[in-house]
Amino acid sequence: MGKDVLGVYHYDEEAVNAVEQLKSDGYDIDEISFVINHEGFKRKLETKTGAAVDIVNQEETFLKKIKNLFSNDSYTNNFENKLAGLGLPENKAMTYAPELEAGKILILVGTNYQYEDKR
């Protein structure tokens, strides 16, 4: 199943509020996830929303850093690859990789998921 980005947020409280709104709009919490590039917000996001949190970071071994130095792989391309690995289409992974690199919080939802409007 593919995924789509439903929002990009600077602050954890904004992201928590957005997920609460999605839940009240009928989205199932199992279909919502966060993507962050560090562990700083992980616990708070999980605790306050119940949504899964994927940490996509750039920790690399020394040998991998040397290999990347001599290849065309860039820091941002690595984020693109990791986002694609989470189910985002290649063009969306390319679009949102710089946002993730900048430390923003992404909210993802499955593209095949049909939410039930509970209003």
Image (cartoon, rainbow, N blue to C red):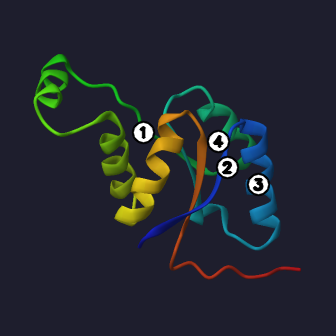
Q: Is residue 52 above or below residue 104?
A: below
Secondary structure beneath dot 3 equals helix
Q: Which mark is residue 50?
A: 2
Q: Earlier in the sequence, mark 4 or mark 3?
A: 3
Kind of residue at disc 1: Val
Marks 2 and 3: in contact by CB < 8 Å?
A: no
Q: Which residue is mark 1?
A: 56
Quarter-of-image position of residue 57: top left
Q: Is residue 105 above or below residue 23?
A: above
Q: Earlier in the sequence, mark 3 or mark 2?
A: 3
Mark-to-mark CA distance, 2 and 4: 5 Å
Looking at the image, can residue 88 be seen? no
Q: Dot 3: few (<14), some (14–19), or many (≥20) neighbours within 10 Å?
A: some
Residue 17 x, y percent position in the rendering: 81, 49
Mark-to-mark CA distance, 3 and 2: 13 Å
Mark-to-mark CA distance, 4 and 3: 14 Å
Q: Which residue is mark 3?
A: 18
